[in-house]
Amino acid sequence: MDAGVILIKNMQEEKGMKHIVLSVGFCILMLLGSSLQASAQKVDYAKYGRMATAIVKEDYPSEELTEYQYMGRKKLGEDLVQDNFKFTVKENNMDKIIIVQVTHSPQNEKLVTLAVKEASQ
């Protein structure tokens, strides 16, 4: 084999390696970005979950809070979301389901509304 053919083969292998390295780097960046966004949302809803818990304990002071569940987030508009929480309190040995809906702006972290509703079983 002459030197020209070897040089061309080496250049093709280097291009292939660069492509692989760039592809792997891109995948890593995508994974990091989605995990950072998920952790930011978790911190975000945890803050409002603490608020919702405090409100339920204040509204039902003599009842035992037995269960708490984050029900998810709904996008309500361009800059508004609603986080939903489900609580179970025990009143006179009966379970009562309480739904707390927290509407807020994720951009400026301002609370817009907080609604507490008793759900039928």
Image (cartoon, rainbow, N blue to C red):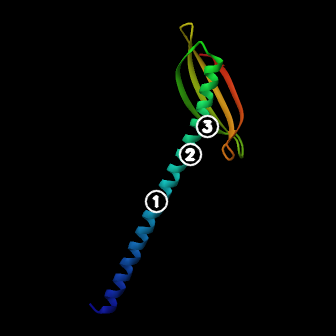
Nearest the viewer among 60 and 81 is 60
Q: Mark 1 or mark 3, which has the lower sequence index?
A: 1
Up the image or down, 92 lies above or below 108; here it is above
Look at the picture and state if 95 lies above or below 5. Answer: above
Q: Which residue is at 38% across, 82% downward?
A: 11
Q: Which amino acid does label 1 sit on?
A: Cys
Helix, strand or loop at label 1? It is helix
Q: How far apart are marks 1 and 3 (CA)?
A: 27 Å
Say which residue label 3 marks. 73
Dot 2 or dot 1: first in sequence order is: 1
Residue under circle 2? 40
Please name the residue shown 45% across and 68% down the image. Answer: 22
CB atoms of marks 2 and 3 within 8 Å: no
Where is residue 110? Give x, y as percent.
Answer: 70, 40
Which amino acid type is shown beneath numbered disc 3? Arg
Of labels 2 and 3, earlier in sequence is: 2
Which residue, given by chain and number where applicable, does mark 1 sit on? 27
